[in-house]
Image: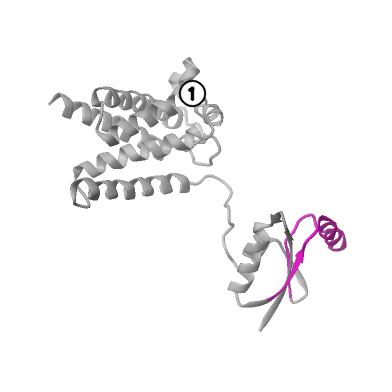
């Protein structure tokens, strides 16, 4: 049996999540773990001084110090838990959930899993979820949004209005209510957004982070951002045409 030692902070009012993850990771890889719980601040500080480390947890395999949770993942040839650099993961998660919800709504409302209306609900639900991300930190969103949105650069309050406008349009379009208001709103903000992304990315060749999922994200401004705005504008136009026809 392979053996390992783990030293982790485990206090009544604080259970170190990385310590728990390290313990699980060692056991998952077949190690019998000698688990040393550091139950006081003094005990934790003494351990750090003794081993000349700055953080806990610390894992030892065959008497050799491996390090903390990230070091353990590297030791087991696993990808970093939180990769550095840009990623599309948040947007993929939001769009995937939006599609699942749209299918669920279609089933409840129409008794089938997919119709043309499912696409409409997918877009409107995605708008709601994206708006929610922005509304968690409107100030942070506005800081990123002002880097590239043409209207917000001319009129700063638009950066604060945008998340609410997107959310309201998304809710109304999901409920198929007040189309005369929600469709032009979605068409307007989607069109302005698409033009802004095209200018920033494809004309000015700027490398920016997208504020589409809020202020604290590593989503690159580019094709996905453009897709979001085109979908929003397209949905608004489609609903306007249906309203008129």
Q: Quadrant of residue 24?
A: bottom right
- Please give the name of the residue rendered at 47% of the width and 15% of the height, measured from the top-left corner: 154
Residue position for label 1: 160
Q: Is residue 236 above or below residue 11?
A: above
Type of colouring: one colour
- Please give the name of the residue rendered at 43% of the width and 19% of the height, measured from the top-left corner: 151
Callout 1: SS: helix
**In the image, residue 10 lies at what x, y percent?**
72, 61
Query: Hey, which residue is sitting farthest left in the picture?
Result: 245
Is any atom of residue 203 visible in this view? no
- Please give the name of the residue rendered at 12% of the width and 26% of the height, measured from the top-left corner: 245
**In the image, residue 188 lies at what x, y percent?**
33, 23
Mark 1 closeness class: few <14, some 14–19, many ≥20 residues within 10 Å: some
Q: Quadrant of the N terminus?
A: bottom right
- Please give the name of the residue rendered at 70% of the width and 78% of the height, measured from the top-left corner: 3
Is 17 inside the magenta-drawn segment? no
Q: Report the span colored magenta.
A: 33-61
Is any atom of residue 40 visible in this view? yes
């Amino acid at each position: 049996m392979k053996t390992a030692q783990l030293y982790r902070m485990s206090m009544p009012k604080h259970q170190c999540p990385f310590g728990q993850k390290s313990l699980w990771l060692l056991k998952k890889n077949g190690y019998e773990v000698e688990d040393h719980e550091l139950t006081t601040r003094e005990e934790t500080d003494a351990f750090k001084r003794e081993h000349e480390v700055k953080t806990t947890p610390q894992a030892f395999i065959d008497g050799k110090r491996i390090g903390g949770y990230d070091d353990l993942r590297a030791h087991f040839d696993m990808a970093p838990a939180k990769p550095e650099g840009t990623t599309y993961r948040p947007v993929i998660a939001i769009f995937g959930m939006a599609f699942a919800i749209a299918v669920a709504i279609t089933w409840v409302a129409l008794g089938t899993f997919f119709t043309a209306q499912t696409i409409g609900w997918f877009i409107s639900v995605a708008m709601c979820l994206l708006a929610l991300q922005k509304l968690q930190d409107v100030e942070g969103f506005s800081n990123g949004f002002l880097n590239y949105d043409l209207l917000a650069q001319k009129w700063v309050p638009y950066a604060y209005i945008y998340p609410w406008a997107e959310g309201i349009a998304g809710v109304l379009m999901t409920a198929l209510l007040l189309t005369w208001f929600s469709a032009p709103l979605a068409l307007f903000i989607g069109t302005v957004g698409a033009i802004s992304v095209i200018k920033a990315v494809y004309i000015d060749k700027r490398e920016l982070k997208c504020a589409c999922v809020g202020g604290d994200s590593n989503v690159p401004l580019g094709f996905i951002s453009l897709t979001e705005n085109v979908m929003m504008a397209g949905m608004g136009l489609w609903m306007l045409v249906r309203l008129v026809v």
